[in-house]
Image: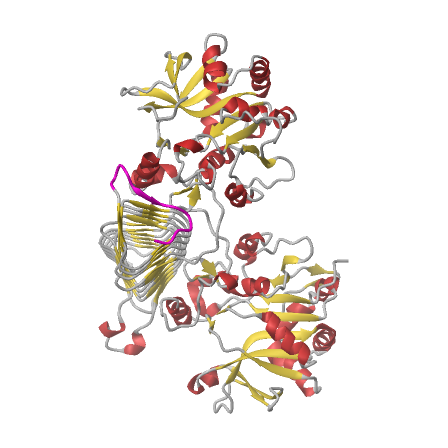
Amino acid sequence: MARKMECIAMLLAGGQGSRLGVLTKNIAKPAVPYGGKYKIIDFPLSNCVNSGISTVGVLTQYQPLELNDYIGNGQAWDLDRANGGVHMLSPYQQIKGMEWYKGTANAIYQNIHFIDRYNPEYVAVLSGDHIYKMDYNKMLEYHKANDAACTIAMLEVPWEEASRFGLMILNDDNSIREFEEKPKNPRSNKASMGVYIFTWSKLRRYLIDDENNPDSSNDFGKDVIPAMHAAGERMFAYLFDGYWKDVGTIDSLWEANLDLLNPKVNLDLSDDTWKIYSKTPTVPPQYISATADVQNSMVAEGSEVFGEVDYSILFHNVVVEEGAKVRYSIVMPGAVIKKGADVEYSIIAENAVIEENAKVGCRPEEISDRDEWGVAVVGASVTIGEGVSVAPKAMIAEDLRKGDE
Amino acid sequence: MTGKNIVGIVFSNAYDECLPELTGLRTMGSIPFAGGYRLIDFSLSNMVNAGIEKVGVITKANYQSLMDHLGTGKPWDLSRKTGGMFLLPPFSTADASNNGDKIASLKGIMGFINQCNEEYVLLSDCNCIFNVDIEKLMEFHSEKNADITIAYKNGKTPALNDIMALDTDNSGKVTNVAVGLHSEENVNYSLNVILMKKSLIERLMNEAISQNYNDFEANIIQRNVNKLAIFGYEVTGYAAVIDSMKTYFKTSMDLLDIENRRELFNRERPVYTKIKDDMPATYRIGSKVNNSLIANGCIIEGEVENSIIFRGVRIGKNAVVKNSIIMPESYVAAGASLNYTIIDKNSAVTPYKTLSGADNYPIYVGKGIMI
C-alpha cells in the first residue's frame, strides 16, 4: 500500500488530436511540440508539480511511444518520487479480456485500483492538451470550502465564440444550475476548461454506475457530470482568468505559439515562481550569424540562424541557412530551412527539410479567396524538394519533389 | 579495456590561480563557459562518453558552486546505484600543506582509489576545453602496452608553470619530459589527461609519499621516463588549455567559429551540463544580433555582436554589446555600451554606462556587481 495522498491527478493524454493531421500521425496530441522547447503535456504536468500534486497518472492510448519515452521516470518534472510520482497508465489485459479506454470516464474507471492505492480524498482529472498555467491547489481549497462533490474550472470566453464550448449556467454562489453543450444560442459565456476536481469517494461510485449503464458513452462531459448533477450532488464552477488555449486545431496551435511573442498576452514562461518544466536536450547555445536578421522571435538552443527570421518560433537544433526566410511560422526541432527557401504562415514539423528556394505557405493578402488560405503544415521528417511550392493550408505528409506538386 | 574498467579522477581546483578573478568565488571546474556550460562539463562528458561510470571529483577550496552544479551527477548519467559520481572534499587535517600539486591532491584521496575495483585510473584537469574520444586513447594504451599514456597537443605551451612538454619517438613512446618549459616553438604539450593502471598509481603514490615528493610532473612522470613505458597520445582536433583571462576570452570567442563549434559540440559525443528550465531566447523588435552565441532564457532588445551571452541575460533597448561575454542572469540596461568586457553572473550595468577593454585585456566585472 502506498502512502495516503490528499489529492492525486489523472491526466488524460490518450487523445489522437485528429484535427492536427500530420502533426499527430505518429504521436499523441499531448506530445506535440509547443513554444520553442515544450510539449503540450509539460503544462498540466508542471501545473501539478507547482501546485503540490506529486502523484500523477498519465492515461495514454493513442501512439504512446513518444510520450512514454518523453516522460520516462518523470525526473524532468521532479516527479521521480519515492512515494507517488508519475505513472504511465495504458490499457491492459484483464481477466475478462482486453479493453481499450472507451471514453474519458472509462479510462479513469479502468484505473480505479491505481487511485485506490493512494486512498486520496480528492482526484483532479485534467486534460493533456491545453496551454495554461494554473494553481490547482487554489481550486482544491475552493472545492473543500464548498464541500463539493465536483468542481469544474471555467473561463469566461467572448460571447461570439461561446457556442464552440461546453457552457455552464451558474447560481449566485457559483454552484452549477445547468449545462449546455455547444448550444446555438448560448445563455452563458462560462466555458469548461476540462479541469475537474472530484471528491474521490463520490466519483468512484459514479464511475461504477456509469460503467454498468449500457447506454453510456463513458465520457465525463456527456455522462458522468450530468449524472452527478441530476442526482443533486454539490457542483461548483471555479473561475479562472488567466491564459488558456485549447490547441486542438492547426490554427489554434499556430496562434498559441505566436501568442508567446505578443507582449499583451498573459502567458509568461520566464516566471521563476511557476516554471514550466520540460525534458531539455543538452545542446550548445544558439548561434546567430552576421548574415542573420532575427526580429520578434523566440529561438531555442542548438539552433543556427544565417537567414531572416521574423515573428516566428524556432525549436532546438533548427538551421535557417543564409538567404532563407522564415516569417509567421513555427519550426519544430531539427528542421532545416535551406538557402533561399521562403517559409511563411507555416508549421514545419520535426526534422523536416525545406530544400533550396522552396516556398511553403503564403501571406493571407497574397490570395484572393480567403477561404483557400490557411497555415501550411509540413509533416515530421518530410523533405520539400528544391524549388517546390507548397500552397497555404496544405498538409504535406510525404516528400515532395519538383513535378510532384 | 572498457570504460567500466576505469575510474575517472577530476582535479576541479587545478590551476585556479591562473584565473584569480573567475575563481575568486568558485573552482576552475565551475567557471561558466560557452553560454551554458561549466569547464568541468568537458572532462566529465569525455569520460562518460567513453563509458566510464565512476568518477571522483577532487576539490580543495571554494567548491560550493561546483557542488551546486554537479548535484548528484544526474546530467552526466553519474547518479548511480553502483559507481557514479563521488565528490571528494579535502580532509582538514591530512593536508595543511596542499600546495595545489597533484601529489598533494591525490594523497588525500588514496583511500577512495584503494577501494575502487576498477583496473585503471584516468586523471583529468578542468581547464582543458576539448571533446576527444577517450576510447581511442584506451585502445592506444592497450596496443602500445603502455604503463602510462598522456594525451598531448602540438602547439605553443600554455603558460602553466608545471606544463609538461613531451618528446616522443616514432612509436609515440615518450623519450624526454621537460617541465615548465616555455618556448616560442611548437612542442607536444600535455593536456594532463593521463591513463594508467590503478596498481601503478598506488605504487607511484606510495613512493612519492615515502620520498616526500611534491611535484607530480617532475617526481612522478619525468623521473620515470626511462623506467616506465610512458606514451604520448596526440589529440589532433580542437583543444584549448585555459591558462589566463586572455585565453579564457580567446577560447570563448573561438566558439563563434562554426568549425570549432562542430568539433566541440559533436552530436556523437554530447557535452552534458546541468539543465535549467529556461524558456527559449526572445528577440524583440529592433534587436540586432550578429555573430553571437545566445543561451535560452535571454531577452534581447538591443544590439549584440561577436559575443557570448549566457542563460537568462537581458539586453535592454539600444544597448550595444560587442566582443563581450555576459554570464548568467546578468542585465545590461538600456543604452549601455560594452566592448571587450566580461560580466560575471548576476551583475548589472545600469543605463547609458560605457565599458570598454581591449582584445588582449578584457575588462572584468565581478559576480553580483552593479555598475
Left or right, B369 with reference to A168 = left
Tell me the quarter of the image containing the N terminus of chain A. bottom right
In reply to whether residue B364 is colored magenta, the answer given is yes
Q: Quadrant of residue A175?
A: bottom right
Q: Nearer the viewer, residue A155 or A203?
A: A155
Q: Nearer the viewer, residue B217 or B231?
A: B217
Q: Quadrant of residue A205?
A: bottom right
Q: x%, y% of residue B157?
A: 33, 23
Relative to B122, residue B254 above or below: below
Left or right, A280 with reference to A75 = left
Q: x%, y% of residue B119?
A: 59, 23
Any part of residue B305 in sight: no
Residue at 54%, 59% in the rendered image: A63
**What span is colored magenta in the figure?**
B358-371
Residue at 58%, 74% in the rendered image: A195
Residue at 51%, 63% in the rendered image: A273
Q: Nearer the viewer, residue B195 or A24?
A: B195
Tell me the quarter of the image containing the C terminus of chain A. bottom left
Residue at 33%, 72% in the rendered image: A374
Residue lying at the far right of the rendered structure: A1
